[in-house]
Amino acid sequence: MRIAIDGAHLGSQADLHQVLAGPLDFGPYYGHNLSALRDRLSKDVERPVEIVWENPAASRGRMGDEAFEAIAFVLVRAAAEDEPNAPNDRLTVRFT
């Protein structure tokens, strides 16, 4: 599965959670916070998944450096944990 995030339309962490929760089927009990995102990405998301964050500079500008970096850290860390896995069993993240 490939999920494209258009950073030009993200202004907050809440926006990102909304964008990811549907396609990744996080369900009604998803906590909509970074801890919940990390848990779901690490344990519950069926692989392979490619998350492509387009226009990251636009979303960084709208949500601020601190919020952007916190989200990026969670995404990149989850992807790094999957690096040893076979390509069809990985979460990958790209910022374009």
Image (cartoon, rainbow, N blue to C red):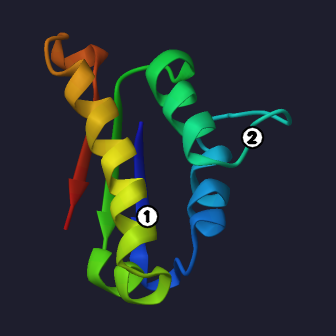
Residue occupied by mark 1: 5
Q: Which residue is painted at 85% across and 36% down in the image?
A: 28
N-term-proximal mark, 1 vs 2: 1
Image x and y of residue 42, in percent = 45, 22
Task: Give above or below for 89 relative to 69.
Answer: above
Residue plotted at (45% across, 68% down): 67
Q: Inspect the image, locate mark 1, and give the three-letter code of the amino acid beneath it.
A: Ile
Q: Is residue 47 above or below residue 23?
A: above
Q: Quadrant of residue 26?
A: top right
* Circle 1/circle 2 CB separation < 8 Å: no
Q: Quadrant of residue 11?
A: bottom right
Between disc 1 and disc 2, the foreground one is 2
Nearest the eye: 9 or 63: 63
Determine whether the residue tagged by mark 1 lies in a helix, strand or loop: strand
Q: Is residue 44 above or below residue 71?
A: above
Q: Is residue 3 above or below residue 38?
A: below
Residue 51, label in figure: none
Q: Position of 7 compared to 28: left or right?
A: left
Q: SS at mark 2? A: loop
Task: Say how many tags the image has.
Answer: 2
Q: Position of residue 31 (x, y in %)?
A: 74, 40
What separation in Å lies between label 1 and label 2 (alpha carbons)? 20 Å
Classed neighbour count for the residue bearing mark 1: other residues with Cα under 10 Å, few (<14), some (14–19), many (≥20): some
Please report the residue visible at 41 percent of the width from the left and 80 percent of the height from the top.
59
On the image, the x and y values in percent for residue 24 come to: 59, 37
Q: Which mark is residue 31?
A: 2
